[in-house]
Amino acid sequence: MDSISRIIPRRLCPGDTIGIIAPAGPGNQELTATGIKWLEEQGFRVQLGATADQELGYLAGSDALRAADLNAMFASPAIQGIICLRGGYGTMRLLELLDYELIRKNPKVFVGYSDITALHTSIGQRTGLVTFHGPMAASDMGKELPLYTWQNFFRAVATPEPLGPIVNPPLVPAPEFIVPGTAEGCLTGGNLSLISATLGTPYEIDTFGKILCLEDVGEAPYRIDRMLTQLLLAGKLQSAAGIVFDVCADCEIEAKPPSFTVEEVLRDRLGGLGIPVLTNLYFGHTADKATLPLGIKATLRTEDGGLIITEAATTG
């Protein structure tokens, strides 16, 4: 993103219309309806995209339909923000079908995580638009959204001032530095599996001088090891200014003896990089999750206890 101008989207306000799209897998209709109701209760209007009720195998419609839906939501002047319905699989199939110039000319808040990582990376690096790694309409808002998740989401997308420290939810341990230090850079990253899968393509992630945030779900420690090793061999971890790793949901239960723990893998693969590494921050596949503005400046600092967002992610 260093070679293009960064674009900070306008903040969302109650009364704005949020477009809901399914750029990856199909959504559960009951969860979709509940998510829509929840957003409306917060004061937003909702407009469903063409993919919201589609199902084509493990995809929410054809590639052409899903790409057109995303392009149309960015193009529509009636839509002030876009929230993805869920992840699953399928966004990598859209990367060559998106109209990045259209997106650049029509910036708006765009939110999702998991498989949506491929869209965050491609849109951010091709348009300069700041996007949001945060809760989705069916996967999160369609369930009982914890107060922590809602407050962090609303602050990120609706408050035109720096978010400051990203703290964990109450009653859980604070994030831990396995390598102490200080680092500054713009946030990038998302789902480890998606970041690994795009290596060697025109859409691979640029980590140089960035704070790289990684999360995943249901991956055994050896698979976490394999993907981190792939990023090491590609030089992506060494070029980052610092690394943040989430609470890896349901990863330890996938471990079959003999095995390392996820923490042991992280210490082994990340501990010798000479850059700060923060672990156990809640921003991935857990009910409690912080919303991270990708493309925004942040600091990792041991003496301050973690990750601090130092720049506003939206404009007034």
Image (cartoon, rainbow, N blue to C red):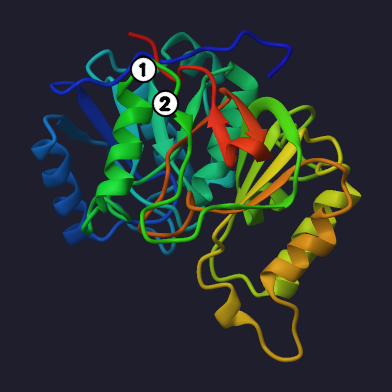
Quadrant where the C terminus lies?
top left
Seen at 54% across and 14% down, the residue is 101
Q: Amino acid at mark 2?
A: Asn
Placement of 21 over or under 269, stated as above or below: above
Placement of 257 over or under 1, stated as above or below: below
Seen at 46% across and 17% down, the residue is 312
Residue 147 seen from this side = yes
- Tags 1 and 2 touching, CB below 8 Å: yes
Report x, y in % for residue 182: 73, 33
Name which quarter of the figure residue 288 lies in.
Answer: bottom left
Residue 210 or residue 128, whichever sits in front: 210
Mark 1 = which residue? Answer: 75
Mark 2 = which residue? Answer: 71
Report x, y in % for residue 229: 84, 58
Few, some or many residues within 10 Å of mark 1 (<14, 14–19, 20+): some
Seen at 81% across and 50% down, the residue is 231
Report x, y in % for residue 280: 57, 57
